[in-house]
Structures are given as structure tokens and as C-alpha cells.
Image (spheres, rainbow, N blue to C red):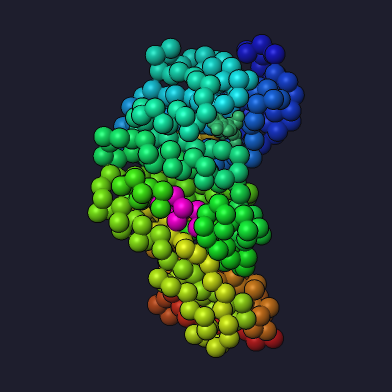
Amino acid sequence: MQEKNAPDAWNEGGETGAKGASALGAMTSEGLAKLHLRSEVFFNPHMRLCRDLSSLWVGALPALPSLLDGFCASGARGLRYKLENKNVGHVAFVDAQPAAVELAEENAKLNGLAPDAFRVMRADINRLLGVGERFDLIEIDPFGTPVPYLASLMRCGSGMDERFVSITATDTAVLCGAHAQACYKGYAARPLHSEIGHEAGLRILLGAIARAAAAEDWSLEPQLCVSHRHYFKVMARLVKGAEGAVETAKTAMSYITHCPHCLYHHMDGFPTPICAWCGQHTQWGGPVWGGDWVDKACVERMQRLAPNRPYLSKEAGGLLAAISAEADGPTLYYDLHELASRHRRVIPASERIIEKLQSMGFFASRTHFSASAIRTDATLGDILDKMEKR
Ligand SMILES: C[S@@+](CC[C@H](N)C(=O)[O-])C[C@H]1O[C@@H](n2cnc3c(N)ncnc32)[C@H](O)[C@@H]1O
Ligand SMILES: [Zn+2]
């Protein structure tokens, strides 16, 4: 293990920390946290952007007297949430792996956390959530799917009126339709292996979270969801109450109809077997979350905090701006490359077609789900009219 003050060992910026992660006893820094790393404890520097955004979101929330970093590994998330945000009180770090627990403890001390400001526990998260302790925010950052933890996540919080959850899913291949059987089994939903698979996948994940929430009388209010690289991140508020829970459950019963022939799509309370655009047979996905996946006011609060965080990755601001721009748009997007190929059109510059549609009075924006797609309330016909024929 290197000395904690050895300056050459610091690796500012995170991305190159991958090398450090494989070297026993390497050190890095990310955001305001200094981190000892160990080869046997998981640390993915490519998740820096995700941690940047989650920590910014935490800062945009009301006071959080008690926070649980449920799959803490090195403690990177819980440490950043605490060090970067004045509204965070006590942090509990939990991991099932003994080496992770040791490392999180070491890192909490390295960053000068007061002994009464944190505790580190070796535990299985489902067991810990079962003992009835209250946390204002729970971070769920597992390997792969969060499904095995949703029931216990929703069962806890007894006596609370509201709380917050931050959930990662890295099984995007399953949610986006590359492994349909695993999606049926884990999420009880049919994925769409298509150009809209990412939004459909996020909505399948939100649907599963919503059903687990509703079963325990919580309503789900997604505040920010992110689709990036190999993961989805859901940051959401839970509000206690049977009436809201019913609405949440109903919102999680939507279906996406997608035509593999002309690429027309829509979301509704039921799938439709024949395409309303071209008359051919459709495919469908769901059940999915049919509600909002972003709360624009929350994103704006985050955007106001961002300039005071010089350590944020460059991408964070751009991603937030993109999400804010599409937040008022309709459900699902159209991929211009796929439309061009299917309908014999020239691939247009996204900005040009967005401007044209906006000048006709339609909503039109890019979408953070895909660099080649646009979100618009124009009809498929209106979009194709604006694309030059080949
Ligand atoms: C993806 S890593 C967490 C990464 C970490 N949050 C970060 O940002 O660097 C998942 C961690 O969860 C731990 N883990 C796996 N199953 C667990 C369980 N049932 N309860 C608690 N921790 C668990 C693993 O030991 C591992 O350290
Ligand atoms: Zn069609």
C-alpha cells in the first residue's frame, strides 16, 4: 500500500484510474474524494460521469440526515455524496465483501470523515434492509441487475413519508432486447431489440421499480434517468400513500408498439398488432413505465449547482443540457439513420431537421439515448417529408 500522501500516486481525473485500479494499493481522486484502490475491490473509473451526476442530484435534494451507500466497494459514491454536499448527514457504507468493507473504512478515514459521520458494515444488502432502519437516500449499485434488491428496498422506510433511491442497472443488453429470455424472467417484460431499444429498456427498468414500489404503497417519481455506455441510472423520489401507489402501478402498465417495417411507434395502455402507418404486423414491448423519466425542475436545480463544481467531468454538463432539452418532448424517438435506410432517404444533419420541424411548430430535440436520433411530436410522415429522397 502506498503512503496516503505520496503525491505521485494521485491520479486526478478518474478516467486513467483504470490503470491504478489494477495495481494493488493504487490511489486516485474523483470529485472531492481521495480513494485508495485495491485490485480485489471493484472500482470502475468509467462510472465517474455517473457518480458526478448522482452526487450533483444528491446536492439538489432536501436535507438527507441518513444515507446508505448499499454496494459501496471502495466507498466512492458515499464519500462523494458526503464530501460534495452539505445536505448529507450520516453515511452508512455497506458491502458483502470483507476487502471492500476494509477499504471503505480506510477511505472514509483518509478523507477525514468524523467518526460519528459514518459507519461501515459488512452485510448482505437484503438482510440489512430487512432490519427496519430508515435511510433518507439509498444507493443501489450492484453488478448487473437491481431486480433482486427491489423488494427489500421498497419494504424498508416504514413510517417515512418520502425518501430517495438511486439505482444502477448494468444489464442493459437484457433490458434492450439482446437477451429476451433473461428480460422475461427478471423484469416480467418483453424487450424491444430495435433502434428504440434503449428508451424501451429504461422504461422496462422503471416499470419494475414502479411495481415493486407500488406493492409497498410508494409512488415513484423519477427525477433523473440516464442512459450511458453500459448502464442505466435511475434517481427517484418515493412518496408514501396508497392512492399514489395505485397511479404508479397503472403508469407501469403501458406498452410500446413498434413497426419493424416502417419504424412507426407509439406507447399506449395496450399494444396494437397492425401498424397504423403501413398496415403491416408490428412487434411490441412491455409492460413499461409510461410516465416521465425526468423532472425538469430537478435537472435545473442540478444545472444551477454545477458551475460551483470545477471537478465535474466535461461530459456531465453536456449530458444534463441534452436531457433538459428533451425533457418536454414526447415519448420515444426516431433514429434518422434507420429511417433513412428503411425509407430510402439521405441521412440528414440532425440539427437541420430539428430546426425545420421546430419552424413548423413541432417539438424537436436531440435525445441523449442516441446520437443519431431525434425526439419530436411531428408525425412519421412530417419527418420523412423533411428528408431528401435517394
Ligand atoms: C458494482 S460494485 C459497486 C461499485 C461502487 N458503488 C462504486 O461506485 O465504485 C458492486 C459491489 O456490491 C458488492 N455486493 C455484491 N452483492 C452484494 C450484496 N448482496 N450485498 C451487499 N453488497 C454486495 C460487491 O462486493 C461489490 O463491491
Ligand atoms: Zn409500419
Residue 1 visible to an observer of this rendering? yes
Q: Residue 173: image x %, image y %?
A: 64, 54
Which quadrant of the view contains residue 58?
Answer: top left
- Give the residues drawn in magenta, as a range: 204-210
Instruction: Name the quadrant of the N terminus.
Output: top right
Residue at (55% x, 52% y) in the render: 186
- The residue located at (62%, 60%) in the rendering is 180
x, y percent for residue 323: 47, 55
Position above or below: 22 against 349:
above
The quarter holding residue 280 reads bottom right
Give the main secondary structure of the magenta stretch.
helix
Q: Residue at x 48, y 79 (%)?
A: 272
**362 or 282: which is nearer to us?**
282
Q: Residue at x 45, y 28 (%)?
A: 128
Tell me if residue 352 can be seen: no
- Vertically, is 42 above or below 342? above
Q: Nearer the viewer, residue 259 or 350?
A: 259
Give the mark count: 0
* Residue 334 magenta-highlighted: no
305 left or right of 353 in image: left
Give the x, y percent position of residue 7: 66, 17
Q: Position of residue 51 (x, y in %)?
A: 53, 37
Q: Quick check: 243 left or right of 259?
A: left
Q: In the rendered image of this protein, does residue 53 appear above or below residue 28? A: below
